Image: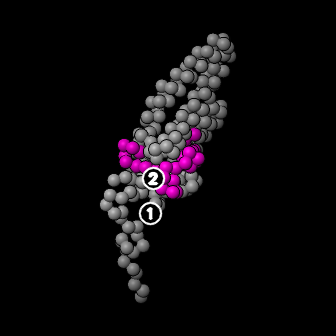
Amino acid sequence: MTQQPPTGYGYGQPQPPAPGTPRPGELVDRFLARLIDYILLGVVNGIVVSGVVVGGLLGLRAGFGGGFGVGAATYAAAAVSAVLSALVSLAYFALLESSRGQTVGKMLLKLRTTGPDGQNPTLDQAIRRNIFTAFGVFGAVPYIGWIGSLVSLVAIILIAVGINNDAVSRQAWHDHFAGETRVWKLG
C-alpha cells in the first residue's frame, strides 16, 4: 500500500501570500468591481448616449417625416445607441486599466490590473482584455442584434469559471488573450 503525501500548504497547494503583499484578485471581488463599473457605465450611457440618440432621433424624424421616417429613425437610434454604448464601455475599461491599472470599481475594492511585466497593461493589452465589453455593437444589426448580448453573457460566464478554476493566479481566458495580464488584491 502506497502512502499518499499529506495535503495542504507546502504539499503542492498554493502558499498563502505574505501579509501586506498583493495576492490574486478573487472572483467575488472582481465581480463586485465589474458590477460597480457597469452601474457607472449604465448611468453614463443613459445620459450621454441617450442625449446623443434623442437629439439625433429628433433630427431624423424632422428630416424623414411620415411613417417611413419614424421606422428609419428608430433603427438609426438603436444602431447609434448600440455602437456608442459598446465604444464607451470598451474605452472606459481600456483607458483606465492602461493608464491607472484600475477602474473605479477596482479602486473601491482595492484591485489592480497589471501586464506581464508587473506594470499597468498597455492600451493594446487592455483592449484585448476587455474586448468582450464591445460585443454589444452587434445590437446595431436588425433581427440578430441579440446575439451580441448572448456572446457577452457566454464570455462573462467563461471568465467567471476560469477565475474560479485557477486557484493559483486567478486568470481567465481574457487575461491570457491579453498577454498574461493579472488582477491583484492590494493590501
Query: What SS does tag 1 mark?
Result: loop
Q: Position of residue 161 (x, y in %)?
A: 49, 55
Q: Amino acid at mark 1?
A: Val
x and y percent of residue 64 in the render?
A: 67, 14
Up the image or down, 48 lies above or below 25; here it is above
Label 2 sits on residue: 183
Name the residue type under label 2. Answer: Val
Q: Which mark is residue 168?
A: 1
Label 2 – label 1 distance at C-alpha: 12 Å
Query: x and y percent of residue 129 in the render?
Result: 55, 48
Numbered range of the magenta stretch? 106-134
- Residue 1: image quadrant is bottom left
Looking at the rendered structure, the secondary structure element under dot 2 is strand
Count of numbered circles in the view? 2
| Residue 181: image location, x then y, percent | 51, 54
Q: Nearer the viewer, residue 164 or 89?
A: 89
